[in-house]
Image (spheres, rainbow, N blue to C red):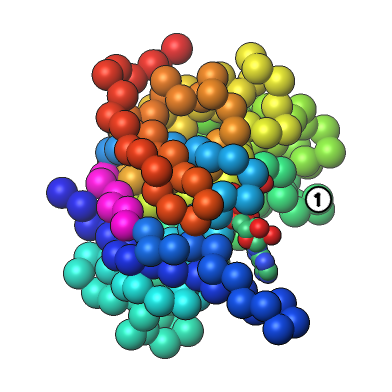
Amino acid sequence: MAFFTMKHVKKTFIQGDVEEEILKGVHLSLKKGELTALVGASGSGKSTLLTIAAGLQPASGGEILMDGKSLHRMDQEEIRKIRAEKFGFVFQAAHLVPFLTVEEQLKLMLDVSESTLTKEAQRKEIARVLQLVEMEHRRNAYPASLSGGEKQRVAIARAIIHKPAILFADEPTASLDSTKSKAVLTLIRELTDTLNIATLMVTHDEAMLPFADRIIRMSDGRILQEEKTEHKETS
Ligand SMILES: Nc1ncnc2c1ncn2[C@@H]1O[C@H](COP(=O)(O)OP(=O)(O)OP(=O)(O)O)[C@@H](O)[C@H]1O
C-alpha cells in the first residue's frame, strides 16, 4: 500500500522576470519494499522531484502526503524531524566526514536522528549494519583510506542505520565503475527488500534499471511513462 503520495506537485523557479515551471503536476506514490527508478533527459526535473519528495525544498503547488499527513501543513521543525527519522539519503558522492572513522559516521547519524538506543545497543546496531554492507572489517578506517565503492557502501550504511521508511538515492552509482555500480545496486536492492524500505532512485544508467521494480520516465517536468519491471535482478 502506498504510504507516501505526491499529488499534482508543481515547482516554479523565478529567474529575473521569467517564471519557469520545472515540475508541471507530478503524481507519484511510493510503496514499502519497492525500488522505483526515476529516469529522463538532463533537465527533465528528476533531482527537483526527488529533493521536493525528500523535504529538502518546498513545492510551489500540489500536495505531499506521508502516512496520510500533508507535509505542506507541517512546520519546518516537523519536516526536519521526518527527514531525520524517516528518510535516508545517498548521493552521487559519499559525502563522508573526513575526520570521522566509519563507525563514527554511523554514530553521528544515530545522534542526528535522536536515537533512543543505549550506547551498547548503538554499538551493536552499528556492527550489524556494517555487516550488512560488508564493511565491518573497516570500522576504524577514515574515508581517505577507502575505495570509491567502499565509501558508497558506508554512505548507504549511514543512510539506513536509523531504519528509515524511505531511501532517496540521487545518482548513487554515478562516480563508480560498472562492477562497483552493480555491487552497490545489489546492496540497495537487498536492503529495500529485507528492511522493507521504499527506495526512490534517480539514475542515468540504464544498466541499473533491471534492479528496479518500477521505472518512471520524466520529460520536461512531467511523468511520461511508468513501467513495472518483470523481475528483480539480485546479482
Ligand atoms: N534552484 C534552481 N533555480 C533555478 N532553476 C533551477 C533550480 N534547480 C533546478 N533548476 C532547473 O530546473 C530544471 C530541472 O533540473 P533538475 O536538476 O531537476 O533536472 P534533472 O532531470 O535532475 O537533470 P540532470 O539529469 O542533469 O541532473 C533545470 O533546467 C534546472 O536548470
The secondary structure making up most of the magenta span is: strand
Q: Crowding at label 1, few (<14), some or many (≥20) Cα neighbours within 10 Å?
A: few
Q: In this view, does 65 lie to the left or right of 114?
A: left
User: Which segment is the magenta one?
Assistant: 27-32
In percent of the image, x 65 and y 17: which residue is there? Answer: 178
Is residue 3 highlighted in magenta? Answer: no
160 with respect to 90 (left or right): left
Ligand 1 located in image quadrant: bottom right
Residue 162 x/y as whole percent: 43, 54
Q: Residue 26 at what x, y percent from top left?
A: 37, 59
Residue 144 position, x and y percent, is 84, 38
Total labels: the figure holds 1
Residue type, mark 1 in image = Pro
Q: Is residue 203 visible?
A: yes
* Secondary structure category for the residue under label 1: loop
Observer able to see residue 83: no
Question: Which of the pair 49/128 is nearer the observer?
Answer: 49
Name which residue lies at 44% across and 39% down.
217
Up-down: is 73 above or below 93?
Answer: below
Question: Mark 1 sits on what residue?
Answer: 98
Classify 150 as above or below 196.
above
Q: Position of residue 188 (x, y in %)?
A: 46, 32
Residue at x 50% of width, y 70% of height: 11
The image quarter in which residue 41 lies:
top right
| Residue drawn where x is 46% and y is 25% of the image | 209
In this image, 99 relative to 10: left or right?
right
Q: Nearer the viewer, residue 125 or 169?
A: 169
Question: In the figure, is residue 173 to the left or right of 5?
Answer: right
